[in-house]
Image (cartoon, coloured by chain):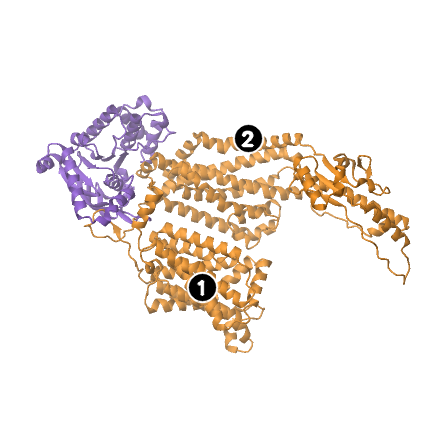
Chain colours: A orange, B purple
Amino acid sequence: MRWSNIRLVFWRECRDQLRDRRTLFTIAVLPLLLYPLLAISVFQVAQFRHDHPSRVWVIGAKRLPTQPSLLSGDRFSDGLVDSATQELIALGSAPPNWIALSQKALSERVQQEIQQGHVDAVVLFPDDFSLRLEELNRQMAKRPTGEGKPVVQFSEIPEPTLFLNTANDKSRLAAQRTKQVLQSWREQIVRAGLRSRQIPVSATRPFRVAHVDLAEAGHEQLAFWSRLLPFVVMIWALTGAFYPAIDLCAGEKERGTLETLLTSPADRREIVCGKLLTVTTFSSATAVLNLSSLVLTGTLFFGQMELIDGAQPLRIGTPPITAVVWLLMVLIPISALFSALSLGIAVFARSNKEGQYYLMPLLLVCLPLMILPVLPASELDAGTSLIPLSGILLLLRTLIEGDYLQAARYCLPVLGVTGLGCWLAIHWAVHQFNQESVLFRESERVGLRSGLKHWWRHRQATPGVTGALCCGLLLLFIRFFAGSQASMPATWRDFVSSQLLVQVGLLAVPAILLARLLGRRVRDGLLLRWPGYKPVMAGGLLAFCFHPLGMELTQLIHNLYPLSDAIGKQLRELESIMGPASLGTLLLTMAVLPAICEELTFRGLLFSGLRRSGRPGFTILTSSLFFGAIHGVFQQSLSAFVVGILIGGLAWKTTSILPGILFHCTYNALSVLLGLVVPLYLPTQPLLQLFFDGADGALRYHPLVVGSGGLACLAIGSWFRGMRVNTYPAQPVRDQRPDTPATDSLSATPIA
Amino acid sequence: MIRVHQLSKIYTDWQHGDSIALNAISFAAKRGEIYGLLGTNGAGKTTALRILATVLAPSSGNATIDGCDVVKDSALVRQKIGFVSSNTAIYDRMTAWELVTYFGRLHGLEPELLRDRMEGVFAQLEMHDFRDVLGAKMSSGMKQKTSIARALIHDPPVLIFDEATVGLDVLAGRSLLDTVCVLRDQGKCIVFSTHIMREAERLCDKVAILHRGRFLAEGNWRDLSQQHGHADLEELFFELIREDRSIHSASSPPASAGGETSVSMAASGLT
């Protein structure tokens, strides 16, 4: 690569972007105006804000006790609530005939009045409320004291009823204020009763809980800014990367200048690097300008504002300078990551308009990862440090909060994952630029009807890539929709039925039907082909050797991302209902059935379609992603994804699902045996003790077995690697002339 | 100067299967010669020229420019060619002067040499009047001139014009054709694709009629007219296309009637 060419491309793109008013507006003008305008708006709105007085009607007010009194004229008595609240309650009388209404009729009338805005809440005191209250006081006064005296049974007092509409903010607020008054009045009644019996009032509250807040001065503000600032920087780094990336790729394609650039002596890596540098620069600039504007506005405006968080208002304070320093340090890798991702996506778009449509999916993927660290319970640990974007946000949060020890502990994994993400994204962007199908993608303006007709006539032996992706999404949707409707099986029989329904009804049968519908040959569409004994047996052997490694991987995943209590409980319940099952039934249900049905779906239907792309990495990873996603539980999905990659490799090399079925079946069977059978015999069988270790309560393979299994996997893998890739079923090349013989698909090698 | 041997290009289409855009074409063009590629839209002209310009990779066969293979020595090939497309490919936010300078620098020209070349090319193409006009504000003729200046700035021995007169008015079109003649006279080897037969008659020393990715006829156009008994290139072109279509429809079974539709869809935009 020649740096001079990269620099040339970089400077040209920068100048081009700086001459674009839209880019300048997004990068410079918007951030400089956004936060001050936001702050001014908040202040303006706050000036107009006033407390809404609540209109409350009381039914049965005339029969209320006078000592202590609830009402004083047309308002609540003094001393029940603070004067400010008292001023905000406007008491009124309900129509006199309401007292005779039934509860249901009264509810309807009150609802009507609330909807019409005549009243916000209504309190109903029953007819005998006052009489019963006096009766209670009398009973209390007469109650015998001393040991051995019988306990008097106090009569119950009918409850006053508060009518409100919780869907209406004003009504909810009125009810809250009224409740406060009534509670205060109730306490006064209790205190009066106690005083009449000469019992100290403190008897009702023998002690109080004192609070000592150990938070250091300013720490609360730090916690607030440590969540807000990294999130804002991330969002703007992404936005600042995407729009220039669209212009630099899709815009160039639209204007036709990309083709010209490709005929220049600059090679494609140089062009990508130049563009990547430009996008990274603009992404960083957007984030820095937003950060500066936010910090400045925060210092000038937000420093005076208070957040109502619980009982104590929290003063936001000014953003800490250390936060800015840390953010600037981490900004470059974040911007580079987003820029490479954006560039890779944007080059796929044919026009600026199309490019903008691709922003939403990228945001949808990134946003949950960015929101996760803002959630209160999330913190930097071994598991979260390995999550892309979330890890770096949590690291930033930890650094801003000043917990340097914790940050140092997980700094390497976070930066490692981010660096790996950057490298992969850049690699992908360069790869995209080398794809003719991406650079010269033409729009196909085909109507739905004619398109469907054309597709049906010309469908191939197996589904296409798009068909496979649609099938995967459809099956995922069906699986999760059915899963959300299903209840937890209570018995073993229920479990078997649900397994049959899921595996056969929701996976295998739809897969066969879709293979028939989307392709001409079902067997090809499901990769049902005999590859020979050796590959099939090698698949089973590979599962046997990989199982110890797989178990270690599962353990690692569970250590990094522990199961939630609810999921753990469900799994324990599931294990408990397996008690009455025989080993044979267990193996059939847990190993054989999923192996056949899931392989038909993921390495059959999906894989046969995806492999038409001619790219093994894409095919194996995508089918594994679907395979992992179908498992539902996150931890299980992760290990299934890894296993899916292995089985995908087998399917790619052998063009058959049979080795995969045997692998899947053996792997699951070993897991069942390890979980249910081995623990029973381990204490008494010395042979088993050679392979397994159950000393610390958890059954695991001996490290020696794990290592040997790994080596055996490598040996089997290299055997498979040496196999010639079978191109069955060969894709015929459709020629324009019928007399031209079909040509083997020739891969188009990109020119560097 | 240009040698193309059995060049084929197959486009892989995820949806519709693969389709052949170029089917084993061969030709050669010499220094000081204009070679015309004639064909309808979708015939494969742009694909062939993009392969020569190293933008696309051939599926089979080979092509060399001044002895350099378009696949193996793609960087060298790009130094030796200037590519002008029908899409003028001008940056909207760059002036003509900035754009040509940019490409000159990409070609590694030293600042002084670049300045001399710029002055020469701008004078030759009469571009000084609009040298500081932004691309977005240029007329089609100005854009095409800028595009030619960009292609000429490094003084390449080979020039590739892909339907360069499309969208130009009569004056601009005539001016471009005159420029091409001048370049030929300067000893450049020029490949000129068009579907306007009159242009080809006027300019080209040799022509090839390309249809559905295959050459239907190739050679000196006067020889071709004698061979087929047509004084007019346009008539010759129509006859060859008609013949090819009749052969195609006679040998094509009724069930494959959708074949042509699918090919044209797959190759849409690939003129």
Q: Mark yes or no: residue A706 visible.
A: no
Labels 2, 1: one chain: yes
Q: Label 2, on which residue?
A: A33
| Relative to A304, A396 lies left or right | left
Residue A392: x and y in percent read: 53, 47
Q: Residue at x 49, y 39 (%)?
A: A239
Q: Distance between the residues labelled 2 and 1?
A: 58 Å
Nearer to the camera, A503 or A610: A503
Nearer to the camera, A565 or A114: A114
Quarter residue B249 falls in: top left
Q: Label 1, on which residue?
A: A594
Task: Specify the amino acid type for callout 1.
Answer: Pro
Residue B154 — which label? none
Earlier along the polypeptide chain: callout 2 or callout 1? 2
| Relative to A390, A595 lies left or right | left
* Residue farthest toward the top in the current orientation of the protein: B129
Location of the N terminus of chain A by quadrant is top left
